[in-house]
Image (tube, grey):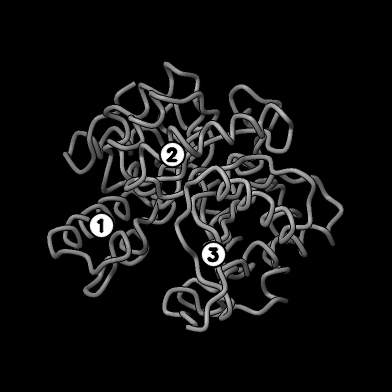
Amino acid sequence: MNRHRELRNVNGTQLEISRLGLGTAPLGGLFTSVTDEAATEVVTTALNEGINLFDTAPLYGHGRSEIRLGRALSLSGKPFVISTKVGRVLDPTDVADTSRFADANPTLAPIYDWTPTGIKRSIHESLERLGIDHIDIAFMHDAQDYVKEAIHSAYPVLDELRDQGVIKAVGIGIDFCAQAVEIISSTDLNIALIAGRYTLLDQEAQDQVFPLALKKNVSIMIGGVYNSGILVNPVAGATYNYLPAATDLIEKAVKIKVFLAERGVSLTAAAIQFPLRHKAVTTVLTGSRSSQELKSNIADFNFEIPENVWDELETSGLIAPLRR
């Protein structure tokens, strides 16, 4: 099965994106440094495997991810769809911060800027770093504390740029459901990237976000399927949403892992495929820092999981029932 390369339409556009997309925060050195050559290899592998969706942001490596992604794509000659983000701009700094991104540009610091000028600047500078003439999808990034600014300041600018063809689709990238509902309700989005809120450990997004998205014809992209690590290896010290996981969450993840293993399914395969159960979900986004990691994700994504496994997970109470 080649589920990962199947294409889905982004609502309200002519964009067709692969069912599995590549998130490029790791190519900005998220937690661990990667070389330029390794970044190019990951992108090339994705293209060769039929993945055409690549997600980035100015935040990732403080511009490093966008530069590496743009360079790798320019060498390939293959068609692609790029999503990047607004809400932060990169300002000059004398204080290097590589605490989160090991490969962060030491001369630049990400600063929130939701003003119309800041949004236009962000798009312009992303175009330059990526080396392209338009952006396929522009996400309003981490707007949980800037909901009004996103709706009343950023969105009108993005809507105008969409009309001009500078961007093809407008969306939000967020991991807070209440704020996602407010923004989706108040704007005319094409797509929403919801991170960590529709996973084996957290099904909150299906309560309000997904029904609203279906009603308003907004495509859903799911990120954070491993909840930042606990659904890869649920042991003491594992992280959940980038913080040390609580003991009860680790215990629940272990129960799910054992349950799946008894049925011949790996935890990572179930985690990466879980979002596809809901009809609102268009695409799953995962990051990879090596070709081997990417190929492993593809294999998990394509692994055949019998439908009864999901039904039994529900019956056991380990996941919430699917709300269709």
Marks 1/3 in contact by CB < 8 Å: the verdict is no
Earlier in the chain: of badge 3 and badge 2, it is 3
- Quarter in which the C terminus is drawn: top left
Graded by Cα atoms within 10 Å as few (under 14), some (14 to 19) or many (20 or more), the crowding at tag 2 reads many
Can residue 162 be spotted in the picture? yes
Q: How many marks?
A: 3
> From this viewpoint, which residue is outermost toward the top?
215
Amino acid at the residue labelled 3? Tyr
> Which residue is found at the position 56% from the left and 54% from the top?
299
Callout 1: helix, strand or loop?
helix
Question: Residue 150 got which mark?
Answer: 2
Say which quarter of the image contains residue 37.
bottom right
Q: Nearer the viewer, mark 1 or mark 3?
A: 3
Question: Residue 60 got which mark?
Answer: 3
Amino acid at the residue labelled 1? Val
Graded by Cα atoms within 10 Å as few (under 14), some (14 to 19) or many (20 or more), the crowding at tag 3 reads many
